[in-house]
Structure formats: structure tokens, C-alpha cells
Image (cartoon, rainbow, N blue to C red):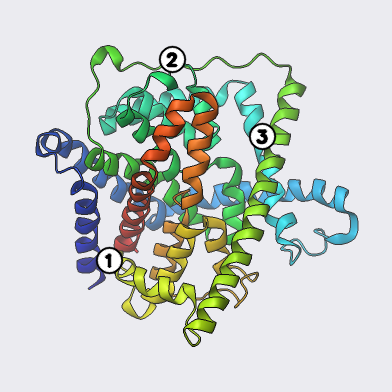
Amino acid sequence: MHVIVGTFGLIVFLLLAYLPTRNVAMLKKKAPYIIGMIAIQFILGLIMLKTPVGEKVIDALSRGFTNLLGFAHEGTSFVFGGLVDYKTNPDGAGPFFMNVLLPIIVISAIIGILQFIKLLPLIIKYLGLVLSKVTGMPKLESFNAVSSAIIGQSENFIAIKKILPTLPPNRLYTLSASAMSTVSMSIVGSYMVMIQPRYVVAAIVLNLFGAFIVVSLLNPYEVAPEDDVFAAPEQKKQSFFEMLGEYILDGAKVALTVAAMLIGFVALLALVNGLFAWVFNGTTFQDVLGHIFAPLAWLTGVPWSECVQAGQIMATKLVSNEFVAMLSFTPQNPGGAVVMSERATAIVQTFLVSFANFSSIGIIAGAAKSLAPSQGDQIAKFGLKLLYGATLVSFLSATVVGLIS
């Protein structure tokens, strides 16, 4: 039964991406690529989640990030002394900030080292080239999608700052949508502490193709051959230790920013829930959101009995951010860790792995505005359309995982 519902849901989400434009001529041109990308999503999803090879790869990645977190805890323990003893309690019931957020600093430093030795630019270049051939998207958009998934949604605009002011709105939308649909490698380790690593990896890969599927329907266009160029950005000339210091501080800023956002959003959500419960006789704001999102959760393949609970978590991610929503699956959740069926857990956790939320509109627009003021204003204008597209990407990836679970 879930296969029938999931297939219907997949069609609905694709239609929701197509209906705002209804460009039949472009649909005919893009259809072969769209069908191909959907097929690739299912093939990669099956390999990652249903084969021994995929399980071994994801297990290796998970162990790698676990080891990195262990190394990060050495630095945390040195600075914060006896607050948390990671050696006697490695799985840690310590503060969330120390266990989950501070390791971002170390992972950010490693990304900086890989950039410095020019390994990451090489990976981005050739993965972007392959992605361009498979998706039919221009080179700039393809390289940007890979780059966004590694260095982050706002930092990525720095790499294209020279050509950013000249980009037309349709191409700017695609760059922004792919950035909002991905996540930064610097915080992937934190996600893996909160939800199952296999769904983190699956979502990252599926969202990469899902973003181009949605954009091909919601924002279709073609680029003239002479405009389909991409020049690799010049790296700033720095010594190794200058670079290392910069990336360590960048990681610290990300950790502190996420902590501040969590404090603010969790507190405000509790306040709004309390007000709703007082006014509506015990019904909270998240209860209302859960019922609104329940039909959408059902379309992804979540069993109807769990749709309200799944809808609550999905909606929480949209109105706050993915960290607040992922807290639902951890002991730090105010009501205790959420327990769902295997399929519902797979669908919801896959849905959560992206930057698709209201705050990301401001982050992306602000990053672009700092480099090209007019382009930042343009992103703000289509901000809701941007969030709409990126959310559909999450629904598509979640539906694919639901169908193969």
C-alpha cells in the first residue's frame, strides 16, 4: 500500500513544482533529464540503503565522523576541564553545545586544509562536470551545487563573487535553491549525532539531484553555449597557519550561531506552544502544524497513524531550522526522544537534512547582498518561492526513501 501512496505522492510533488510555471515547451526539453534524475535517485537510494556495499560505505563515513568527533572532544575537554569527561563517558550525556556543536570547529578546520592543498577544488570541479552532463544544467549551476554541499550555502557565494552581479534572476534562483537544498559538510557530523547517519548521507546525495529536478520544473531555462562557462575561483593567498586560523574561527562562528538560533527558536516555540495551549484548551502550536502537514507526510509514505507526529517535526524544521527538528530524536527533546516506525523514521529524518527553512532566506539573501547588493534584494523578492522549491526537494527525497524502505 505504501508503494501506491508514495508513487502518488511523488507525482503530486512533481506537479506542485510544475504548476507555477506550466511551461510545456521547456518541459518537453527537460523531461528526459528529469526522468533520468529520478531514476538516478532511486538507484543511488537503493545502493546506499539496501545493499551491503552501500551500508559499508555509510558505516565507514559514520565511523570517520565519529572519530573526528572524538578528536574534537579532546580539544573541548582541554578547554572546559571537568565539565564533561569524554574518556569515561564517550557517548556523553554532556551539554548539547559541547557534544554536538563545538566539533564543528574541527571539521571546519579540516575543510580548510583540504581547500589549501587544492583537493576540494579538484573534487568540486570534476563532480560538477559529471553532474552537468547528467542533469543537463549549465556548468556554473552544477559546480555551485557540489560546492554548496561542501562549504555551505552562504560561503559558497564568495566563490562566484566576480560573476554574481551579472547573473539573471532565473540563474540566481537556481544557485540559491541548490544552496538551500543542501547542507554544509562542517555540520554533517553534528547531524549524525542526532539522527541516523544513513539517512544523512542518503539525503545529501538525493537532494543534489532533487534540487535540479524541482528547478527544471519550477524555474526552467536554457543558457547559450557562450554563457555556459565556469572559471574556478582564485584562492586567497595565505600561509597555512593564516588559513587554519581563519577556518577555525569560521567554525566557531557557525557553532555559536547555531547555539544562539537553538536557544531562541526552542524558547520561542515553547512560548508559542504555551500560548496556544492556554487559548485553545491544551492544543499547542505544534499540534496545529502537525495536522496541517499530516497529509503531506502521508504522501511521502508515512503510515497515517504517525502522520500528525511526522507533520509536527517536518513543520518545526520549516518554521525554525533542522537542528530544532532533529532534537526530537534525541534525549534532549523536552518530551523525550521521539520513537516512530522504521519507515516513518527514514522518511522524516531524510526530510530534515537540508537548509530549507524561513531563516535560510535571510542567510542566503544577506550573503549575496554583502557581495552584490542588488542580487541580495532579488533573492529576498523570490524568497518564498525559494523556500517553496527547496521544501519540495526535501519532500521528493523523503518520498524516494519512503518508497524503497
The type of residue carrying mark 3 is Ile
Front label number (1 vs 3): 1
The type of residue carrying mark 2 is Ala
The tag earlier along the polypeptide, 1 or 2, is: 2
Q: Position of residue 197 (x, y in %)?
A: 53, 55
Q: Position of residue 309 (x, y in %)?
A: 43, 75
Secondary element under disc 1, as helix, strand or loop, is helix
Which one is nearer the viewer's eye here, 226 or 99? 226
Could you classify mark 3 by the number of other residues whose Cα lies within 10 Å: few (under 14), some (14-19), or many (20 or more)? some
Total numbered labels: 3
Which one is nearer the viewer's eye here, 21 or 310? 21
Q: Position of residue 326 (x, y in %)?
A: 54, 62
Alpha-carbon span between mark 1 and mark 3: 39 Å
**What residue sits 43% from the left and 18% below the top?**
163
The type of residue carrying mark 1 is Leu
The tag earlier along the polypeptide, 1 or 3, is: 3
Q: Which residue is mark 1?
A: 299
Please identify the quarter of the rendering in which residue 185 is found. Answer: top right
Q: In the orientation shown, which residue stands out farthest toward the front?
A: 279
Q: Are marks 1 and 2 in contact (CB under 8 Å)?
A: no
Q: Position of residue 293 (x, y in %)?
A: 36, 68
Please identify the quarter of the rendering in which residue 254 is found. Answer: top right
Alpha-carbon span between mark 2 and mark 3: 25 Å
